[in-house]
Image (cartoon, rainbow, N blue to C red):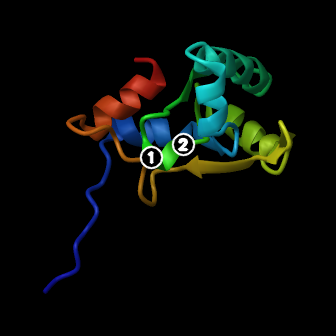
Amino acid sequence: RPPRSTPKPSSAASDVYKRQVIVHNVWTANEAEACGPAFFDELESEFSQECGKYGPLRSCKAVPREPSLVGAVVVAFTTEEGREKCEGDMDGRWFDFRRLRVERYAGSGAPPTPPRGASLDDFFSSLDGS
C-alpha cells in the first residue's frame, strides 16, 4: 500500500503561508466564556495593534471554532519581513501570565484544519481578509 500523500496547497494558499504566523497560548476557552461575546473582537484589536508594529497586516483572527487553534491568534502580514519580525519578537514573550509560542507556516507541514465543508483556499482567504 503506497503512503498517503498530503495535497499541495494552491499558490494562493502558499503565499498566505509565507506571510502568516500562529501565536499560541494567547487565550483560554474559560476566559472567552467568562468575558462574553466582545472577547474576540477586543483580543483581535489588541493583537492587531501589537503585531502591526512589525509590518502591515492583512488580518488578525482568533478562530475559536477550530480545535487546533483554540488559544491561538492567526496573523497574516502583507510581507514575509513583517512575519519574520513578529516571529522573532513575539516567540517566548509573556502575555497575560502565559508564554507565547509562535508558529510559522511556510507552505510545509499540515496547515490548520479548515471548518467542515470549507476548502483550504476559502479558509486561508478568510484569514487573509480577501
The residue at the point 40 percent across, 17 percent down is 130
User: Between residues 93 and 53, which one lies in front from this camera angle?
Assistant: 93
In the rendered structure, which amino acid carries the disc numbered 1? Pro
Which residue, given by chain and number where applicable, does mark 1 sit on? 67
Residue 79 at x, y percent in the picture: 61, 30
User: Between residues 93 and 27, which one lies in front from this camera angle?
Assistant: 27
Badge 2: few (under 14), some or many (20 or more) residues near its Cα, within 10 Å? some
Within the image, what quadrant is residue 46 found in?
top right
Within the image, what quadrant is residue 61 found in?
top right
Badge 1: few (under 14), some or many (20 or more) residues near its Cα, within 10 Å? few
Identify whether 100 is placed above or below 36.
Answer: below
The residue at the point 35 percent across, 33 percent down is 123
Q: Are marks 2 and 1 in contact (CB under 8 Å)?
A: yes
Quarter of the image for the N terminus: give it. Answer: bottom left
Residue 92 at x, y percent in the picture: 82, 51
In the rendered structure, which amino acid carries the disc numbered 2? Val
Query: In this rendering, would 116 be left or right of 20?
Result: left
The residue at the point 69 percent across, 45 percent down is 25
Query: In this rendering, would 35 be left or right of 116?
Result: right
Secondary structure at badge 1 equals helix
Residue 48 at x, y percent in the picture: 69, 20
Spatial CA distance of label 2 from label 1 is 5 Å
Identify whether 52 is placed above or below 75.
Answer: above
Residue 109 at x, y percent in the picture: 45, 60
Q: Which mark is residue 111?
A: none
Count of marks overlaid on the render? 2
User: Between residues 81 and 27, which one lies in front from this camera angle?
Assistant: 27
Farthest left residue in view: 1
Q: Which mark is residue 70?
A: 2
